[in-house]
Amino acid sequence: MTDAVGTSLRIMIVDDHAMVRAGLRMLIEQEPHLHVVGEAGDLNAAVGLAAREQPDIILLDLDMAGQNGLDVLPDLLAVARPARVLVLTGVRDPAAHRDAVRRGALGVLLKDQAADVLIKAIEKVQAGEAWLDRAVMGRVLEDMRTKKLPQEADSEEAKIATLTHREREVLDLVSQGLKNHEIGERLFISEHTVRHHIGAIYAKLDIPDRLELILYTYRHRLAKPPA
């Protein structure tokens, strides 16, 4: 977890290339509020390290010497409950990005992004906000959309129809990336009421978390993905 003073984010790196881990550590520790607490070069070691260190953020590579990082993602979240996972990958396959989100990753970032984008992604994910690379966002959403069967689409339309006008307003602002207190200010309601509305939306749409909710709004054309 974060240090007592609340100023340092504890980060764990999981990648099978030592040079990549060293480079990530160097970039991360140039930021005074970020601290690397450990590195793992294989998935088994990663689970043990996460359990021991309880990091705030886990940077997880997808393709690790024949191992799929997604296979261990739920285990990482189980042993390090405060942690949020940001997947770093060179894989541009939208299906892999979709699977990462469905298994619990809060963000997916392509490895060829600039260092400042990595830092921004870490900060956004730690704040509980989703981070999906814009270069693949459209393909991920299209891939998810085309896998819907006609009867599934009808079922989702029925769920959406149960939302109240206020819940639709809240949903629209969530899809824009606003935080709960910002939604409350925009709609002149308390943050507690915002949380209540979001909980009702989760229940009606059968969605477990905010990232899935944002993806849902894009997939069902309730909101436009970022350009």
Image: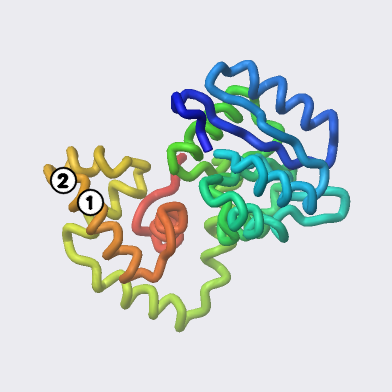
> Can you say whether 161 is above or below 34 in the image?
below
The amino acid at mark 1 is Val
Q: Which of the labelled discs sits on residue 23, or is there none?
A: none
- Residue at left offset 54%, top offset 34%: 121
Q: Nearer the viewer, residue 145 or 89?
A: 89
The amino acid at mark 2 is Ser
The answer to which image quadrant residue 60 occupies is: top right
Disc 2, disc 1: CB below 8 Å? yes
Give the distance between the C-alpha atoms of the residues marked 2 and 1, in whole angstroms: 6 Å
| Side (left or right) of 83 relative to 19 | left
| Side (left or right) of 135 relative to 186 | right
Q: Which residue is mark 2?
A: 190
The answer to which image quadrant residue 158 occupies is: bottom left
Quick one: label 1, few (<14), some, or many (20+) residues within 10 Å?
A: many
Q: Which residue is mark 1?
A: 194
Q: Secondary structure at mark 1?
A: helix
- Residue at left offset 53%, top offset 21%: 33
Residue 23: x percent and y percent?
76, 25
Quick one: label 2, few (<14), some, or many (20+) residues within 10 Å?
A: some
Q: Secondary structure at mark 2?
A: loop
Q: Is residue 77 visible?
A: yes
| Side (left or right) of 112 relative to 190 | right
The answer to which image quadrant residue 164 occupies is: bottom left
- Residue at left offset 27%, top offset 65%: 200
Residue 53: x percent and y percent?
64, 40
Residue 45: x percent and y percent?
79, 48
Which residue in the rendered view is the most extreme toward the left?
188
- Residue at left offset 47%, top offset 80%: 150
> Can you say whether 164 is above or below 62 in the image?
below
